Image: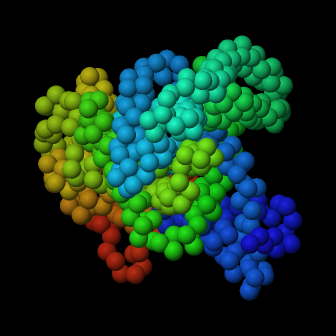
Amino acid sequence: MTHHGGGGEYKDLLVFLAAAGVVVPLFNRFRISPVLGFLAAGVLLGPDGLARFADAVPWLGWLTISDANQLRALSELGVAFLLFMIGLELSWERLKAMRRMVFGLGLSQVAVCTVGLAAVFMLMGQPLVSSAVLGMGLALSSTAVVMPVLAERGRLSGASGRTTFSVLLAQDLAVAPILITVTVLAALAQSGATDGGEFDPAVLRPALFTLVPAAIGLGLLVVLGRLVLRPLFRSVAKTQTGGRGQEMFVAACLLVVVGAGLGAQAAGLSMSLGALVAGLLLAETEFRRAIEVSIEPFKGLLLGVFFVGVGIGLDLDAVAADPVAVFGLAILLTLLKAGLIYGTARLWGVKNRTAIETALVLGPAGEFAFVILGAGLVEGIASPGFTGTVMLAATISIFTVPLMAMFADRLANKVAPTQPDLAPEAMHIPSVEGQVLVVGFGRVGRLVGELLAEHGQKFVAVDANASTVSKGRSEGSNVFYGDAGNVDMLQRCGIAKARAMVVTMDFPAKVDEVVSAARSLRPDLILIARARDSKHAERLYRLGVTDAVPETTEASLQLAENTLVDLGVPMGLVLASIHERRDRFRKLFQDAMPESKGERLPRALRSTNRRQGATEQQS
C-alpha cells in the first residue's frame, strides 16, 4: 500500500537523503561497511519495513519510501557512474594487457557457472530452457556492490582486486549477448525446437537484428568519443578562469556519462557499458584527474540510491512465507558459484590466495540477474513462481557481499598465506640489534629510511607487499618481507634489541595492530607511528606510542610554514611558532590518554614526557 504521508513527490528523495546523512554515518562509526548501511536503510524504510505500520501510525509515512520507482532511474545512474570511474582508472592499453583475464578467465567463468547452475536447476525439476535462463542470470555478480566493498578494504590495487575486476568486466560485456540468447531461446521454445520439433532458421532473425545495432552502437561510441570528448573538455576548461566555471565542467561530466549510457541503451547495450567506454576514452586525456574529482560525489550518492533500491526490493513477506527455501537456495547458489569460480580461476593459473578471495566476493548474485530473469519472465520461458523464489535468494545473497569480503580476507590468510616471488634472503630478517625497525617501506617509509641513513642511523625495514620489498631491495635498501602485525614476526625481527620502531603504513587499522603487538613485547621501546588524523593520533597514544604524527596536522603546519615564509616572516620566528604549535597538539593528544585514571603509561612515553617538561622549564 502506498503512503505518501503528505510529503509530495519529493518525499521519497528526502527520506533517502536523510538516511544517507544518518544511517550510513552510524554504520561507519561502528566500522561496518557503508554498503550494508544503505542496504539496511532500504529494508527499514521500504514498503515492507516501517511503511507497513503507516496505517496505524500515520507520521511514519514521512519516514518511509513509498514508491521505489522514483529512485530506480537514479540508481541506474549510480551504477553507470561507478563504471565510468572504473574506466577512468583504465586505458585501452591496460585493457589490452588484461585481455587474457577478461576474455579468458572472465568469459570462462560466465560459461562454467551458467552450465553448473543450470544443471542444479534441472535437478530441481525445471525445464532445460528455464534452467538455462536462471543459470545465465545468476552467473553474473554485482559490480555495483563488489567494487565499492573492495575499494573500502583497500583491495582494488592487489592481485585479487585486478582479477575480480577482470571477471566483472567480462560479465558486463556478456549482458547483451545473454539477453540476445534469452530471445533466441524464447523463439526456439515457441517453435517447438527445444522439444524435438523441426528447427526454423527464421526464428533467429530477431536476435540478429538485435545484435547488429549493438555492435554498430558500440563502434559509434568509440569513434565519436575519440573525435568529440577531448575538444569538448578543452572548450569547457577555457571557461574556468580564477576558479570560476567549475559548474560547466561538472555539467560536461554529467553530459558524457548520461549521454554515453543512453546511447548504449539505444543500441541494445547496458547503460553501464556505455559509461565504461566513455571512461576508457577520457582516461587517455589530460582531464582525467579533474573529471574524477568532479564525478566522485555524484557516484557515491547515486550508488547509495542503488543499494537502497536493492534493500527495498527484498520482499520480507515472501521470505517469511518460506524462509528455509529462500535462505537455503541463497546459500546453495552462492557456495556452488564460488566453488565453480575458484576452480575456473585455478585452471587459468590464478594463485590459490587470489582465487579464494575472488571466488568468495563473486559468489553472490548481481543486479543484472533481475534484468535477465525479468526478460525470461517476459518471454514466457521462466516459471513465475520458482523464478520469484530465485530472485529473493539472489537479493539476500547480494546482502552478503561485504561479509564475504571480510571472510575472504581471513580465510585467504589462514588457508593460503601469501607466497611472494622474492629471493630467499628477502624472507629471512637478520638481527636488528641496535638498529631502527621501520615498518612499511612505501613512499613515507622510504623517506624515513633515507633520512636515518643520512644521519648515520642503521635501520631495517619490513613490508608485507612483495613488490614493494622487491623494489626496495633492487635499490639497495635493507628491506625484508613480513607482516609486522604478527607478534612472532616482530620477535623474529629482533624487536627485543631494537633501538626504536617507526610505523609508516597508511592503513589505520593495521597501524593499530602493529603498535599493539610491538607495545605488548617492548613497553620501553621508542615507538613512533603515522596517524591518519587527530582522532587516530589520540587512539595511538592510548595504545602506547611515544609519538604519533597525524597527516592532517602536519600538512596544515607545513602549509602555514610555507605561507608565512613566502610572506616575508623571518624563518627563525616561523620555525619557533611551528614547533610551539606542534608541541601543543602533542599535549592535546596525550591529554586524551587514561593517565588520570591511574593507568600506567609505557616507560618510554613517560620518559619522553619528562624530557619535554624539562625542555619547557629550561626555555
* Picture coordinates of residue 134, whole percent (x, y): 47, 47
Residue visible at 66% across and 35% down? 271
Colouring scheme applied when the structure was drawn: rainbow
Out of 293 and 171, give the one closest to the viewer.
171
In the rendered structure, the answer to whether residue 308 lies left or right of residue 613 reads right
User: Residue 129: x and y, percent?
Assistant: 47, 42
Q: Quadrant of residue 57?
A: bottom right
Observer-nearest residue: 293 or 523?
293
Q: Considering only vertical position in the picture, is 314 above or below 250?
A: below
Residue 534: x %, y % from top left: 52, 58
Q: Residue at x 36, y 81 (%)?
A: 598
For the image, the number of numbered tags is 0
Q: Residue 590's quadrant in the figure?
A: bottom left
User: Which residue is the extreme one toward the front?
Assistant: 197
Q: 98 or 329: which is nearer to us?
A: 329
Q: Where is residue 422 in the image (x, y as percent from the top left)?
A: 20, 29
| Residue 436 visible within the image | no
Q: Is residue 412 left or right of residue 99?
A: left
Quarter of the image for residue 175 reads: top right
Residue 102 seen in this snapshot: yes
Q: Nearer the viewer, residue 78 or 110?
A: 110
- Does 201 appear above or below 245? above
The residue that appears at 24% across and 64% down in the rendered structure is 520
